[in-house]
Image (cartoon, rainbow, N blue to C red):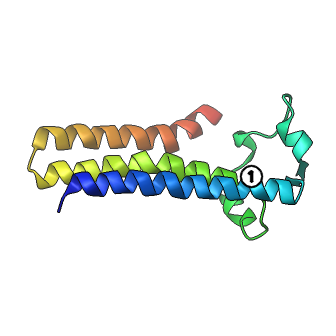
């Protein structure tokens, strides 16, 4: 098993899938002249209230069947963020298979730091 090819393909596929989802979301914005109750003018305004803090992941998934463009764009961004996280996970598997304890431990620490920054830190900051 060549981990370098697996990691490279994972990164390429993640970026391509993310780009396709985001482009689809932008197309939906123009087709429906907005999304989630906001018009394109409201979304694109420099003083827009539309930002990532008003969308929760659970709400994003519920908006997908309704073809809300903003929900598809945020899903594409979530896939884009998940792609390097998956790369770190594959790095743990790669170093473990090579029996390289030092880099396995370092990569595990990097993974936990990522998980802390993505899931725990926003909860702590919002309180």
Q: Quadrant of residue 47?
A: top right
Q: Is residue 112 left or right of residue 69?
A: left
Which residue extends farthest top? 46
Tell me residue 109's x, y (percent).
29, 38
Give the residue drawn at x 44%, y 50%: 83
Give the residue drawn at x 70%, y 42%: 52
Tell me residue 50's x, y (percent).
80, 40
Q: Is residue 84 left or right of residue 21?
A: left
Tell me residue 32's x, y (percent).
88, 59
Q: Nearer the viewer, residue 107 or 34?
A: 34
Give the residue drawn at x 76%, y 56%: 27
- Quarter holding the N terminus? bottom left
Label total for image: 1
Q: Is residue 123 left or right of residue 109?
A: right
Tell me residue 30's x, y (percent).
84, 54
Q: Quadrant of residue 24?
A: bottom right
Q: Quadrant of residue 75?
A: bottom right
Q: Nearer the viewer, residue 45 or 54?
A: 45
Q: Is residue 31 visible?
A: yes
Mark 1 residue crowding within 10 angstroms, few (<14) / some (14–19) / many (20+): some
Residue bearing the label numbered 1:
26
Give the residue drawn at x 44%, y 57%: 13
**Up-down: is 10 above or below 102?**
below
Which residue extends farthest bottom? 65
Label 1 SS:
helix
- Quarter holding the C terminus? top right
Q: Is residue 100 left or right of residue 66?
A: left
**Up-down: is 125 above or below 104?**
above
Q: Is residue 127 visible?
A: no
């Amino acid at each position: 098993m060549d981990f370098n090819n697996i990691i490279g393909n994972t990164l390429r596929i993640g970026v391509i899938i993310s780009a396709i989802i985001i482009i689809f979301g932008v197309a939906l914005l123009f087709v429906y002249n907005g999304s989630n109750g906001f018009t394109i003018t409201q979304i694109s305004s420099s003083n827009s209230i539309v930002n990532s803090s008003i969308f929760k992941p659970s709400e994003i998934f519920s908006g997908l069947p309704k073809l809300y463009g903003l929900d598809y764009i945020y899903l594409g961004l979530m896939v884009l963020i998940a792609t390097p996280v998956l790369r770190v996970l594959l790095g743990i598997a790669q170093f473990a298979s090579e029996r390289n304890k030092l880099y396995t431990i370092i990569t595990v620490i990097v993974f936990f730091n990522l998980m802390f920054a993505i899931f725990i830190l926003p909860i702590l900051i919002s309180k």
